[in-house]
Amino acid sequence: MKLLQILIHNIMPLAVMIGTGMLVQRKFGLDIRTLSKLTFYLFSPAVIFKMLYEAQLTYEFMFQVLAFFAVFIVLLYGAAEIVIRLRRYQGGMPGAFRNSVIFYNSNNYGLPLNQLVFGGNPYTMAVQIIIMMMMNVLPFTYGIYSVNAHRMSLRQSLRQIAAMPVIYVIPAAFLLKWTNVAVPEPIYIPINYLADGFLAVALLTLGVQLASIKWNIRGDVLLSSFLRLCIAPALGALVVWAMGIRGEMAAALILSCAVPTSLTSSLLAVEFGNEPEFASQAVLVSTALSLVTIAAVIYVLGYVFGI
């Protein structure tokens, strides 16, 4: 029953929105770069600010989850790097492949999945919120550098990163939250409007991009999906065990590692012209295959943690 609910309430809505974007693109021929800029400079900063400003988080809890995340990402990066070297990727492909593996869909897939599996438990939701925060920071810092490293100097990449509003939104949200400063309503209402529109615009953008590419699913896409959907949760379980994390936090962290490739990796590829076809296909294929892999992860977590 849980798996059927995941299919109906999480996977199908994503497929419908992406499919709508594909149909609109075939009918009207939209400008993908304009859509990606709207996402990067308006909708993403708004949803991140709202998420951080409203979340209830303690320092000790944040430190434990962040420590897990740091170790996990380093191991996942290493796994992706081994494949890159073995496959001898060149040009923009190393950055695109890394991003497809280490950037995962913690927002519109991971959050509702957490809600469904753990029954809206505030404790496990807080775990997911911190992971979401980091998965919104990493693409707009390292991710931008990664897709540009083969053609830009470090200084030029830093300029690209500095131009991203997300870099300033995150500290602003924490500062206002910790100093108990209320955001004026004439400002916060528009932020809410933008935050509510993020998911629709982001998924439509992916659909537009998918409709614009030639379909030729490469072995590289399947390899990326294998690392993202199978190796990533295994590494997450290893880190949880090594750090002595137990109970609901352990289950929530492992589940957070098992979701498909983030839409952000595709948006980065489109915005900076770096292997957009591979990046878009990695998102779609990993999302489709996650129907099976997520079911397996939930089954194992239920057996081990009794969720």
Image (spheres, grey):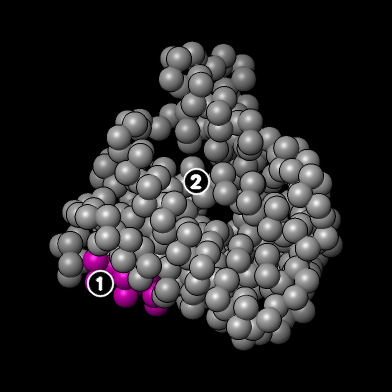
Number of numbered discs overlaid on the protein picture: 2
Q: What residue is at 74 percent from the left and 43 percent from the top?
A: 158
Considering only vertical position in the picture, is 104 above or below 128? below
Q: Is residue 208 visible?
A: no
Residue 33 image point, x, y percent: 81, 53
Badge 2 marks a residue whose secondary structure is helix
Q: What residue is at 40 percent from the left and 45 percent from the top?
A: 66
User: What's the distance in space between the residues labelled 1 and 2, CA to CA?
Assistant: 27 Å
Query: Left or right of 190: which side holds 135?
Result: left
Residue 271 among magenta residues:
no
Considering only vertical position in the picture, is 12 above or below 243? below
Query: Left or right of 40: which side holds 47?
Result: left
Considering only vertical position in the picture, is 238 above or below 148? below
Quadrant position of the N terminus in the picture: bottom left
Amino acid type for the residue under numbered disc 1: Tyr
The residue beneath circle 2 is 134
Considering only vertical position in the picture, is 17 above or below 195? below
Q: Is residue 222 visible?
A: yes
Q: What residue is at 63 percent from the left and 36 percent from the top?
A: 167
Foreground residue, 78 or 140?
A: 78
- Quadrant location of residue 233? bottom left
